[in-house]
Amino acid sequence: MTVLLLGHDGALLEGLAQLFAMAGFQPVIAHDALDAVDLARAELPIAAVIDRAIAVTDAAALRIPLAAHGALVLYRAEHETAVPLPPAIARHVVADLTLPLERQRLLALVRTLSQRERESGRAIGEQPEDRARKDNRGTQRRRGELKDAEECI
């Protein structure tokens, strides 16, 4: 699953990309909101990790398309002061983290989103008819087991 990273701090983004790659995700880095939207349209990310300053100044950052159970996460560097987010922006995000201090919390959040995506059966690339076929095979298998059980009785 893809994780989109949007920001200007190259070293921080590279560190996050390595963290997500080692955890089995596919990180994609963008340096402006319009590029991020284009990259997200190519493959819907499970999470978009966005620099808080970009989210506040560029409305396109909040319009990044996401996977079915995806979420927007904002971050700020530890040396930046924490000012309250405008309510219009706060409604769109699930977390506002200080990085790199809270990188493990970020990873845990993305893992949770990914797990929720898989458990719901709405993983990227799986079509609704694929899920229906899986359900029908399970039902047919259970019916066959019931017939076998009835014959034994």
Image (tube, helix red, strand yellow):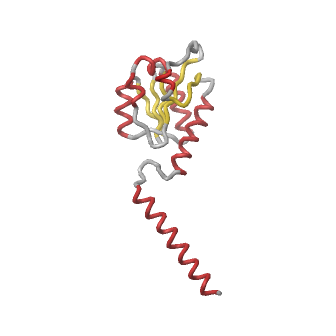
Which image quadrant: the C terminus? bottom right
Q: Is residue 101 left or right of residue 16?
A: right
Relative to residue 150, is residue 129 depicted above or below?
above
Total residue callouts = 0
- Residue drawn at the location 48% of the way across and 39% of the way down: 70
Quarter of the figure with residue 15: top right
Tell me where residue 27 appears, x and y as whole percent: 47, 35
**In the rendering, at what x and y percent does residue 127 appear?**
40, 54
Q: Name the spot of residue 20 as percent of width and height, x first.
A: 54, 36
Residue 113 place in picture, x, y as percent: 54, 41
Furthest toward the front, the residue is: 87
Q: Residue at x 54, y 19 (%)?
A: 76
Please name the residue shown 49% across and 42% down the image.
Answer: 69
Q: Residue visible at 62% across and 81% down?
A: 149
Residue 83, relative to residue 148: is it above or below? above
Q: Nearer the viewer, residue 24 or 133?
A: 133
- Residue 105 in which image quadrant: top right
